């Protein structure tokens, strides 16, 4: 596979059957969007930029659009269901709790993308249609993926509004931090049932022309008690990356098993957010009340021997419980939050990359043991 720093990726991929511009938004269905918007504003340092609700003619739902750099979250809750979409959201929150319903992808041509996807086996949910207002036109379409998750295909090349037609610009809930907490969505991880990983990897290969970046099987992601398998698919530019996990047979319940049980089926497990200063990110998020997974001090005793020099000294990594990993292309720094809702389902990763396009393989054992300790505390190991 062509690596991301080669010249070929700096020119248009004329043969790409499903070109993408990047992640457009991560859309959450939540029980109370107003409170969720406040949480992500204060704890994650995001900025409210747009809103849709009764005040501007939307009688069914309230949606808050928050951004941090290129990363965009849309938080939606139902006021009074009156359409199939509203009823779907109500049922989704009842069945799954707060969670991701849509990984929206920006594309240069939503009509072509939708036609290609359906022709290659995708289930179409909404055929392409236009949304218009004084800011221009957006073309959107939707296809289904694992569980009740969907991909909205968004062509916003003819639009300069705050988000989509039907939304109005909104003032921040709190004063945004002086420095962005994170800059972009690095990758979005899906959990699927045992035996389904290859099926969904094949879906992205076939439907979107995504290729396989990494594969973790067997002892790659295993501890004494639990294990999982994972494959990563990405578009040709590696702007959109989707790891797909499934549980593996082990002595006890893996984090994937726990997620599937409490989420009620397959869905988005975690969102990785790219930062260029993970120390500042972690300090500000901790101060705002975000809780991260704990890592034992012993992890850091030999870290420097195999990771080598990093931008952040080992002592500071130890203090903040930040993980580090190195591969043939460089290194990365990463840390994981605990679940951000009462159900042990969705959580977040903060990641700072220095050349490495990996996913922290060297940290899997320490990370999964930390997750197992949390599972045991919840009585779910």
Image (tube, grey):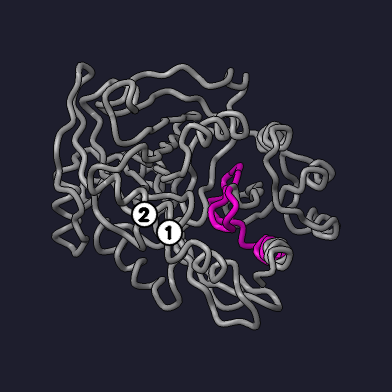
The span shown in magenta is 341-369
Q: Does 71 sit above or below residue 296? A: above
Image location of residue 159, percent across then percent down: 24, 24
Judge left or right: residue 299 versus residue 339.
Answer: right
Q: Are marks 1 and 2 in contact (CB under 8 Å)?
A: yes
Q: Please give the label number shown on residue 95.
A: 1
Image location of residue 207, percent across then percent down: 24, 60
What residue is disc 2 on?
91
Residue 345 among magenta residues: yes
Which quadrant of the rendered structure holds the C terminus?
bottom right
- How many neighbours does mark 1 have within 10 angstroms: few (below 14), some (14-19), or many (20 or more)? few
Write the residue at 41% across / 19% down: 170
Write the residue at 29% across / 44% down: 86
Q: Secondary structure at mark 1?
A: helix
Which quadrant of the rendered structure holds the N terminus?
bottom left
Image location of residue 269, percent across then percent down: 50, 57
Write the residue at 72% across / 44% down: 310
């Amino acid at each position: 596979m062509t690596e991301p720093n080669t010249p070929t990726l700096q020119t248009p991929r004329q043969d790409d059957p499903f070109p993408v511009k990047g992640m457009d938004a991560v859309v959450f269905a939540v029980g109370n969007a107003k409170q969720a918007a406040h949480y992500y504003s204060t704890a994650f340092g995001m900025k409210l930029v747009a809103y849709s609700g009764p005040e501007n003619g939307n009688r069914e739902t309230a949606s808050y659009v928050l951004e941090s750099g290129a990363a965009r979250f849309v938080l939606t809750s139902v006021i009074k269901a009156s359409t199939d979409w509203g009823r779907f959201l109500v049922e989704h929150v009842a069945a799954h709790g707060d969670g991701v319903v849509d990984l929206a992808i920006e594309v240069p041509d939503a009509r072509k993308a939708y036609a290609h996807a359906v022709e290659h086996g995708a289930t179409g949910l909404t055929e392409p249609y236009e949304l218009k207002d004084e800011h221009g036109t957006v073309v959107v379409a939707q296809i289904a993926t694992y569980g009740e998750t969907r991909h909205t295909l968004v062509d916003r090349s003819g639009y300069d509004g705050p988000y989509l037609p039907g939304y109005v610009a909104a003032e921040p809930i709190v004063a945004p931090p002086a420095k962005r907490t994170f800059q972009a969505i690095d990758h979005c991880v899906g959990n699927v049932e045992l035996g389904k990983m290859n099926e969904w990897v094949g879906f992205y290969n076939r439907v979107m022309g995504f290729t396989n970046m990494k594969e973790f099987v067997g002892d790659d992601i295993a501890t004494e008690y639990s294990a999982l398998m994972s494959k990563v698919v990405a578009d040709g530019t590696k702007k959109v990356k989707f790891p797909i996990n499934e549980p593996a047979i082990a002595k006890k319940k893996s984090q994937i098993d726990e997620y599937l049980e409490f989420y009620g089926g397959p869905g988005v497990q975690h969102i990785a957010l790219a930062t260029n200063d993970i120390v500042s990110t972690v300090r500000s998020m901790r101060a705002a009340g975000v809780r991260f997974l704990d890592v034992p001090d012993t992890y850091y005793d030999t870290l420097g021997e195999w990771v080598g020099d990093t931008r952040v000294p080992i002592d500071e990594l130890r203090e903040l419980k930040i993980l580090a990993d190195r591969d043939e292309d460089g290194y990365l720094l990463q840390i994981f939050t605990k679940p951000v809702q009462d159900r042990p389902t969705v959580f977040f990763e903060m990641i700072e990359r220095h050349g490495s396009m990996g996913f922290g393989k060297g940290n899997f054992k320490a990370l999964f043991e930390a997750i197992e300790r949390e599972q045991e505390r919840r009585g779910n190991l």
